Amino acid sequence: MQVLIHSDQEKVAEHAYDFLRHIMKKRKRLVLGLASGSTPLRLFRKMVAGFTAGEVDFSSVYTFNLDEYVGLKPDDLQSYHCFMRASLFDHVNLNKDNVHFLSGIPEDIERHCEDYEQQIREVGGIDLQILGIGRNGHIGFNEPTSSLASRTRMVILTQGTIRDNERFFPNKEDVPGRALTMGVGTILEARELLLLATGSEKARALAAMIEGPVTAMCPASALQMHPSVTVLCDQAAAQKLTHTEYYEQVAGKENAATGNLPYEQRQT
Ligand code: F6R
């Protein structure tokens, strides 16, 4: 796992965009896993700006979002569908047929989740999965105690997650209590993982994920089992890490500060 600590969230987004741009250049066709929520918003803005400036082309990009609230229709303002359209999809040249989403209103939940996994397999698997992390260590909506081998399925959200996501809804009572999410096992099958974490409220979860034991109590800790993980975080989120000197040594101190580490020199 490579951990790169930046001064602030803007630098994290800049580095994430560079990372993605580099991979998009290398691959003719890219299958991209996406997270929603506040953390990737700056990255999405950079992707839109990069597309507008002619730096990146999404015509051969396939996307799979991690999760969706159960009960919300794609055009409900608080759905992740709607969020993704407003913040990214409507502003770049993604082919609509290449955009994949879990439905919040599937007729048959189990079948729908199996179909989603099948769709991922049919395009050859996810090349790069972008992740955020919940304050409780969740990835996607895999809450603590989720099996680290779990597949796409319906989950019950913790009260903590419901409280954390209240800010996106008019009232607390409107936050759905259930969601569909890719499983931890599904996420671990992506070829490369890029996790973004910003803000002091993520510090405890980030330290547990990187330096704690691998445990279902912190589903993100399963990333320790993946051979190709890059963590981009700001200093606020990194404040509870204890091995920062080593992370900076690996990254090259100056490069860690400026975010200019050449990809060819990346180590995991
Ligand atoms: C959402 C997702 C979640 C979020 C996490 C952090 O698609 O995958 O795991 O990444 O809840 O959310 P924010 O970024 O809003 O703090």
Image (cartoon, rainbow, N blue to C red):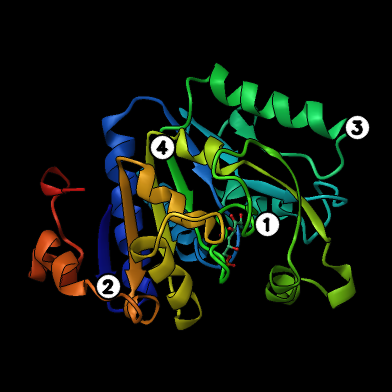
- For the residues bearing labels 4 and 1, Cβ distance under 8 angstroms: no
Check disc 4 and report its element: helix, strand or loop: loop
Judging by the rendered image, the residue that carries numbered circle 1 is 83
Judging by the rendered image, the residue that carries numbered circle 4 is 57
List x then y, in percent, for residue 230. 31, 52
Mark 1 to mark 2 CA distance (whole Å): 26 Å
**First-in-chain label (1 vs 2):** 2
- For the residues bearing labels 1 and 2, Cβ distance under 8 angstroms: no
- For the residues bearing labels 4 and 3, Cβ distance under 8 angstroms: no
Dot 3 amino acid type = Glu
Check disc 2 and report its element: helix, strand or loop: strand
Residue 225 relative to residue 146: left or right: left
Mark 2 to mark 4 CA distance (whole Å): 27 Å
Q: Residue at x 40, y 76 (%)?
A: 237
Q: Nearer the viewer, mark 4 or mark 1?
A: 1
Dot 1 amino acid type = Phe
Q: Residue at x 26, y 32 (%)?
A: 26
List x then y, in percent, for residue 147. 60, 45
Q: Nearer the viewer, residue 13 or 69?
A: 69
**First-in-chain label (4 vs 1):** 4
Numbered circle sitting on residue 6: 2
List x then y, in percent, for residue 189. 46, 33
The image shows residue 33, relative to residue 137, as above or below, that is: above
**First-in-chain label (2 vs 4):** 2
